[in-house]
Image (spheres, helix red, strand yellow):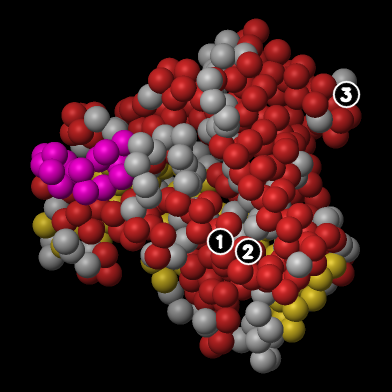
Amino acid sequence: MRLVILGGGGFRVPLVYRALIRRPWLGIDEVVLYDVDLARLAVVAAVLEPTPGVRILCTDSLTEALTGADVVFSAIRVGGAAGRVRDERRALDLGVLGQETVGAGGLSFGLRTLPVALQAARLQAELAPDSWLINFTNPAGLITQALSDVLGPRVIGICDSPIGLVRRACRALEIDPERVEYDYAGINHLGWLTGLRQDGRDLLPDLLCDDALLARTEEGRLFDPQLLRSLHAVPNEYLYFYYAAREVTAALAGSATRGEVVLAEQDEFYRVAGGDGAQAAELWQRARQHREETYLAEARQEDRDEGDLTGGGYEEVALDIAQAVLSGRPAELIVNARNGSTIPQLPESTVIETRCQVDATGAHPLPLPTLGLHQLGLIASVRASELGIIEAAVTGHREAAIHAFAIHPLIGSRQVAADLVTSIEADEPAVAALLGA
């Protein structure tokens, strides 16, 4: 069975591979790493430990990679970390939030990434029509939404933030996350935990009303406890960029962005590991530990929870999905899939992030309690903006891109939106060509 990783020279690919070899029962005996950067591919290949029965292939040919694929993991980063830095800095220069997946940065990232992601999805549909695409290319919700028009239910988007939130809430309450039912809903990087039941009793109110319990969670330390009580929910950590937009934008404007930090660290790793393949695995492990410890450091005030560092991230979620779709044995997971009638106020085609049953036919959202007007309004506003970016990427309409930026709740200015698009065109030749600039 053939697993293809698009973006195979990416820094986190060894996490996926190590998680995979812990699951020999999946029957994956061929792993294809695809990337346009052969030097990075070579470094990542040096990090991976040879495993009996698993063949590793490296290629910069998308056709070669996708031919015969059973499962495809998409983790491409068009423009690399340098592109992320440009996204973050141009936003901050215009006085709006500069963050990789949220607001202006996320829309810029999506506009640059979509043409490449769509091309790969169309080729996958042609060469491997029965294969599955598990997407963690960011911004994951926007990209999965666009790719669902090409691959339908055969694309499932993932993120590890929601299950991390559930685990933290359970640790604070000293309950087993395997023995609870929970309600989580939204879109990627914009969701809320609204219920946490054990033996039929909702324990989330117990968490929300107790400052000491909340302080055991990163969210309780990140957000004002009174905000959480007013929401009657615990937000995904990325909602910090909405609930404290002014403060975090001001703080980022005077310091190095996360992208700048990651760019420097990754360039150093690939440079040193490229010159000393024998030490590549050790160098990668050190760099990975530091990166995980400082994840979302622009919002976090203290070290990351140890439980998050050892609990398994998106690679485990991705393989849980692969196991469910390949074996047909259902699993309940928080993933990105088409809404259907789960949130009746949203179109059926809207890709939402919620608890789903995943099986051989895809991901199917499970019933949810009714979301409040605040949640619905924010979801609708952000997804409308992202749909404008998808329209721009598919049609090349510059006005669609400007409108998408203008209506995003973290931008709210047509002049800033127009300036952002002009700046993107100046920085990104491929986007300029797409929009006819």
Q: Tell which circle, 3 or 1, labels the residue nearer the N-terminal end.
A: 1
Work out whether residue 350 or residue 6 is closer to the camera in this orientation and state it: 6
Question: Circle 2 is placed at which residue position?
Answer: 283
Helix, strand or loop under label 3: loop
- Distance from disc 3 to disc 1, alpha carbons, whole Å, reads 44 Å
Residues at circles 2 and 3 in contact by the CB criterion of under 8 Å = no
Q: Amino acid at mark 2?
A: Leu
Question: Circle 3 is placed at which residue position?
Answer: 436
Helix, strand or loop under label 2: helix
Residue 198 horizontal side relative to residue 63, left or right:
left
Helix, strand or loop under label 1: helix
- Please tell me whether residue 30 is drawn above or below residue 395 in the rendered image: below
- Distance from disc 2 to disc 3, alpha carbons, whole Å, reads 43 Å
- For disc 3, the neighbor class at 10 Å (few under 14, some 14 to 19, many from 20) is few
Work out whether residue 17 or residue 355 is closer to the camera in this orientation and state it: 17
The dot on residue 338 is none
Q: Position of residue 382 (x, y in %)?
A: 51, 30
Q: Main secondary structure of the magenta part?
A: helix
**Disc 3 versus disc 1: nearer the observer:** 1
Work out whether residue 9 or residue 420 is closer to the camera in this orientation and state it: 9
Q: Which residues are magenta?
A: 207-222
Which residue is farthest bottom?
Answer: 52
Magenta highlight on residue 212? yes
Quarter of image, res 283:
bottom right
x 29%, y 54%: residue:
168
Question: Circle 1 is placed at which residue position?
Answer: 286
Q: Tell which circle, 2 or 3, labels the residue nearer the N-terminal end.
A: 2
- For disc 2, the neighbor class at 10 Å (few under 14, some 14 to 19, many from 20) is some
Q: Position of residue 186 (x, y in %)?
A: 41, 42
